[in-house]
Image (cartoon, grey):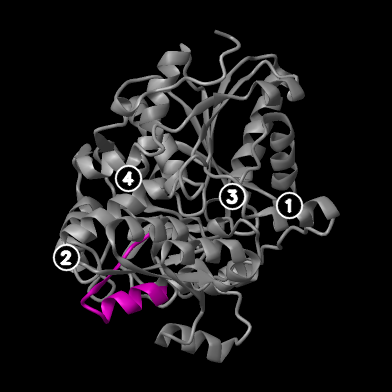
Amino acid sequence: MNHRVQFPLGAADIPRAWYNIAADLPDLAPPRHPASGRAITPDDLLAIVPEELARQELTLDREVAIPEPVRQLYARWRPSPLIRAHGLERSLGTPARIYYKYEGVSPTGSHKPNTAIAQAYYNKQAGITKLATETGAGQWGSSLALAGALFELDVSVYMVRLSFDQKPYRQMLMQTYGARCVASPSTETETGRAILARDPDSPGSLGIASSEAVEVAANDPTTNYACGSVLNHVLLHQTVIGQEAIAQFALADDYPDVVVGCAGGGSNLGGLAFPFLGEQLRGGKPVHVIAAEPASCPSMTRGTLAYDFGDTAGFTPLLRMYTLGHGFIPPPLHAGGLRYHGMAPLVSEAVAQGLIDPVAVTQTACFAAGVRFARTEGIVPAPESTHAVEVAIREALRCREEGIGRTILFGLSGHGHFDLSAYEDYLSGTLRDGEFDPGKMTAALAELPDV
């Protein structure tokens, strides 16, 4: 048993319902209407999302059934592997048992199709023909492009300019699936034109790209908005990850003491950790959950818990979350999926309740961990995933120092095959850590809505 590498499940073991941690977290602060400040209702969301997703966003039901057509598409790559990292353990000389849940086996190479497939399905059922969305590094955009192809939906993706320039093959993947990829800020929307007028060289941000996508959806009745992270229904769909992991740990006759996930908007972390936290909240074994965020965009470790917009222009409902301010533009970072000003409300509430510990890590340290992982386990991690690898290594080294053999699980949320230029920068010694500017955060926080 000690030398087993994988703990396989079959297609029949794909979860039949998503887990909603909102049912087990007391006193959740509701999203609020940006104009009136009142708690929003599902009807408030129907201008940009279908009825079922609006319902899922606000439901307190512990389980939401997964439609069979969605499960059938999941079966093309799910259940995803749970892998024991024997090579990494040996290289660290640690008594820790290290496992990773590998989402890079999906067609687009990340965890994002878990919600892209679901959102495309519900929009197709509602008669929608077009979807607009944002993307940072491109994992979400390429996943929604795939889902659009499978459900015959037209997809427009507003990709953060910094990542658009860094990752041309992500653009090409989206186009191969039939989607349209536009650098954001763009000249296609009022939001984009206004930002370019102020800063023609803007690197963009997920908040800006979100504003552009929401603006397009709000102005076209045939177009809906699809979100890649942050919102409750997105994190809900990702919980197939953690539910599978629980079943796989039963096969391994083990259970994690520590669960680590990278965190930008929260979907990967929530998808992995929420089912374990749900077990804990209902009387099961406690786990130490660690959220690994970038030191250059540290919403949880440096930000403020407050109501804020999910986008830069202020189109979205007000969300109670850890935020750097919706106007904050993070410095350049190869982990473009983590360059977001806020953290998902559900993750934020779990942090506030002491259920999740956030840790900020630097870009160069993360790439060093990514290279070590590639050389011991054979998989090149996405830049976002290297944040989880770095923190998992820290925890394993702590086990070595303390002489304690804890079980560590981390989420390998995707592979880095489209990110080799970033590894080239690291290996050539030209990669630098982005500098977080507290003054810019202070200025952005001064613009928080008065709720």
Q: Quadrant of the C terminus?
A: bottom left
**Which region of the structure is painted magenta?**
211-228
Residue type beneath disc 3: Glu
Q: Are marks 1 and 4 in contact (CB under 8 Å)?
A: no
Quarter-of-image position of residue 190:
bottom left
Residue type beneath disc 2: Gly
Residue type beneath disc 4: His
Q: Is residue 133 left or right of residue 128?
A: right
Q: Residues within 10 Å of mark 1 (few under 14, many from 20)?
A: many
Quarter-of-image position of residue 366:
top right
Q: Which mark is residue 384?
A: 3
The answer for how far apart the CA atoms under marks 3 and 4 are is 20 Å
Q: Residue furthest right?
A: 429
Instruction: Say which residue appears at 62% left-offset and 63% top-offset.
Output: 167
| In front of the other: 58 or 102 | 102
Q: Which mark is first along the chain, 4 or 1?
A: 4
Residue tagged by mark 4? 237
Q: Which mark is first along the chain, 3 or 1?
A: 3
Residue 101 vertical placement versus 309 (above, below): above
